[in-house]
Amino acid sequence: MQSENSSAQKIETLIRARYPLIYVVSFEEGRVSRNLKLMTDARKKELAAWTITAGLETPDGSFITELKDPIKVLDYILQSGANGLFVLRDYHHYLNDPVVVRKLRDAARELKMTRKNIIFLSPVLKVPTELEKEIAVIDYELPDKEELALIIGKISGSLDGRGQPAAAECGRQEKIVEAALGLTAEEAENVFAKSLVQKGMFDVSIVLSEKEQIIRKSGVLEYYHTNENMKEVGGLDELKKWLVKRGKAFTPKAREFGLPEPRGILLLGIPGCGKSLTAKAIAGLWQLPLLKLDVGKVFSSYVGSSEENVRRAIQTAESIAPSILWLDEMEKGFSGLSSSGMSDGGTTARVFGTFLTWLQEKTTPVFVVATSNNVSQLPPELLRKGRFDEIFYVDLPAKDEREEIFRIHLQKRGRGAEGFDLAAAAAKTGGFSGSEIEEVIVSALYDAFDQDSELLPRHIEAGIQAIIPLSQTMEEQIRGIREWAKLRARRASSIRWEEESGAVRQLEM
Ligand SMILES: Nc1ncnc2c1ncn2[C@@H]1O[C@H](COP(=O)(O)OP(=O)(O)OP(=O)(O)O)[C@@H](O)[C@H]1O
Ligand SMILES: [Mg+2]
């Protein structure tokens, strides 16, 4: 039932290779324990589980309560003659104790000679440096399609017993299972049950919206149903072309052809010019689920958990793969890197390391879209070849692009372009960003509404006059970003901007 590379399989391999100390990171105590039990039964090993509150539960189901003490239980395991697997739940709280550390370092050597293994099972990973080399870490994966299908079967089976409608038909079941990917077994069970109660059947939209809630609760991840598509992004023709081409590379046919799995892109550039918008539109273009990781939040919570946050985000993205993981305003997370050794005990550097390694080595089709408007705060390691497929520089929109952006935002608000001279409006808005053009339209609509009038060219004119574009106050920074990008990034647009004697001027190339 377990796939080749499942976590259960990896644990079994470690046990066969006599790794004495294994750390399993998971929220799913029940599911992990059930799977461990399957393995120990098959391998004729005994399974014992410890908690601080109950002590050690032996294979016969009785508890040795004298062993609640976290050190005593280690002594017990060391003396035990069993061929056994000892699962210590939430033991991470005690791993900082110097006595525990010393004991485990000795134990690691001793246990190698025996057929005993210790498994630390905990939702958080906390391994003191002294033990890093002794402990093997497994991030226990979330349930895959097969496991979720079993859960559906179990739930609908129990319904059948009460004479209610049977399980969803095969085609629909596949969709339900897909919708539930990214949830723990327990969460999936609850979501399915809720759907049955509310609708009398398994409903994809209920499962999806529950999933959205659950993922949001994690605090740093947001699951997006995007409505955005590329038609809402003005300009950026090069970037769009690239994305259309790469979208095809997700297919099995592309693999056969010898194409590598797309890895990700980094979008750098001026604020308000469509980086975040494009990130969302990619999900629409490729029809893939989008997870947004709030990089700022990852680091703002209490220090210890930022590693956990990143690991969990990666895990969730992988469990719903093929998927897109969007790191918006990435510089907010990784900016403190140079000073982090002093300021946060190296956490930022460690988290960054975890992320980089994953970015480089990932084998699951998770496409990373990172956006940033401050290149100076990004660590150079991130920009090295091989991390991202491409680094794109998103500049202020050129004249033709501005015209398109005007049209897009009129259309978005139910207005056609007829009666407006958008080319003229574009000519007057040199230096405006996409979001400033949007602002022009919105303020024009306010004016028109206030005057009980339909939207007229003069409202747009007034809107243009009222806005001082950021590019005027940020001239220096923009020049800096452009200089930087010239050598290191590919242009997102084939139409080029150039500055001349202080005034921002467009050059058609
Ligand atoms: N190229 C564009 N085409 C259409 N609309 C745009 C474009 N650029 C910006 N906008 C409008 O401005 C809004 C803000 O843009 P967006 O959030 O994508 O900017 P950003 O590049 O991510 O900026 P920041 O660096 O500040 O995060 C968009 O939601 C969209 O409505
Ligand atoms: Mg943005």
Image: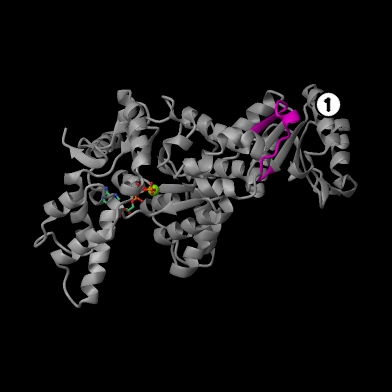
- Rate crowding at label 1 as few (under 14), some (14 to 19) or many (20 or more) other CA atoms within 10 Å: few
The structure residue drawn at horizontal position 36% and vertical position 26%, both measured from the top left corner, is 260
Q: Compared with residue 502, is residue 231 higher up or lower down, i.e. above or below?
A: below
* Residue 440, quarter of the rendered image: bottom left
Q: Residue 350, how many percent across, how many down? A: 60, 34
* Residue 503, quarter of the rendered image: top left
Camera-side residue: 345 or 271?
271
Camera-side residue: 30 or 245?
245
- Which range is magenta? 122-137
State yes or no: Cβ of the residue under disc 1 lies below 8 Å from any atom of ligand 2.
Answer: no
Q: Quadrant of the N terminus?
A: top right
The structure residue drawn at horizontal position 64% and vertical position 43%, both measured from the top left corner, is 32
The structure residue drawn at horizontal position 23% and vertical position 62%, both measured from the top left corner, is 463
Q: Residue 339, how many percent across, how many down? A: 60, 35
Is 213 placed left or right of 226 in the picture? right
Q: Residue 201, how many percent across, how many down? A: 43, 64
Q: Quadrant of the C terminus?
A: top left
Amino acid carrying label 1: it is Asp
**From this viewpoint, is residue 407 visible?**
yes
What is the residue that sits farthest to the left in this orientation? 419
Which residue is label 1 attached to? 106
